[in-house]
Image (cartoon, grey):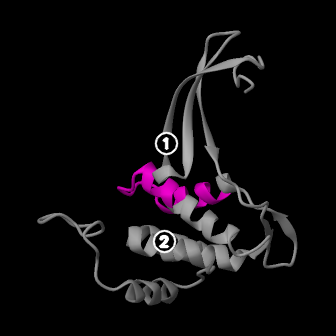
């Protein structure tokens, strides 16, 4: 594995652990050249996915792009990075079992379903971008759809959201 700091091709694995509920392997490595330590993840990839955008164009599926979008929606929320990573992995696994090509709308719907169970505010934030909200009534409709707050999204006693 090439060192991200000095570019040396030789690195030594110092520690390996199962990650993401067994869906990945986390490896701590040390560069033989500069001595820097870094982490790599090894995941099963069933196939190379192609995303069909709304305008009909096609692009390669990017796991990091999906994680970034979910991260923006859940910014400043009490959602652990592990939960976000599990959601990204779950969506990716679902998509990979469907075929080589997937519509962007399908990705958005799967993310929304996951966020709805994880955090209602993150769900509404993601929906506002994904569904291109243009009026305040759009927010009111999706807020009604969410319904009762879950244990994770409810405010502690005596505290407002």
SS category of the residue bearing label 1: strand
- Secondary structure mostly seen in magenta is helix
Q: Are marks 1 and 2 in contact (CB under 8 Å)?
A: no
SS category of the residue bearing label 2: helix
Instruction: Give me the disc on residue 114.
Output: 2
Pick whichever, 32 or 136, lies toward us: 32
Q: Quadrant of the N terminus?
A: top right
Can residue 77 be found in the magenta stretch? yes
Q: Is residue 101 above or below residue 16?
A: below
The residue shown at (55%, 85%) is 135
Pick whichever, 115 or 89, lies toward us: 89
Side (left or right) of 161 relative to 95: left
Magenta-colored span: 65-86
Instruction: Give me the disc on residue 141.
Output: none
Judging by the rendered image, the residue that carries numbered circle 1 is 18
Q: Is residue 100 above or below residue 133?
A: above
* Other-residue count near label 2 (Cα within 10 Å), few / some / many at <14 / 14–19 / ≥20: some
Q: Earlier in the sequence, mark 1 or mark 2?
A: 1
The residue shown at (55%, 64%) is 90
Image coordinates for residue 122, horizontal then vertical, percent: 45, 67
Side (left or right) of 131 relative to 100: left
Q: Quadrant of residue 94?
A: bottom right
Gap in angstroms between the C-alphas marked 1 and 2: 23 Å
The residue shown at (50%, 77%) is 113
């Amino acid at each position: 594995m090439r060192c991200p700091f000095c570019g040396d091709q030789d690195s030594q694995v110092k520690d390996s652990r199962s990650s993401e509920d067994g869906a990945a392997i986390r490896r701590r490595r040390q560069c033989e050249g500069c001595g820097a330590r870094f982490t790599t993840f090894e995941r099963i990839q069933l196939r190379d996915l192609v995303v069909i955008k709304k305008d009909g164009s096609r692009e390669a599926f990017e796991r990091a792009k999906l994680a970034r979008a979910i991260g923006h929606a859940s910014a400043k929320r009490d959602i652990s990075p592990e939960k976000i990573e599990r959601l990204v992995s779950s969506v990716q696994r679902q998509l990979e079992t469907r075929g080589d090509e997937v519509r962007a709308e399908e990705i958005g719907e799967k993310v929304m379903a996951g966020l709805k169970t994880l955090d209602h505010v993150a769900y509404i934030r993601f929906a506002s971008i994904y569904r291109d909200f243009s009026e305040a009534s759009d927010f009111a409709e999706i807020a009604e759809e969410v319904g009762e707050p879950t244990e994770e999204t409810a405010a502690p006693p005596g505290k407002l959201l």
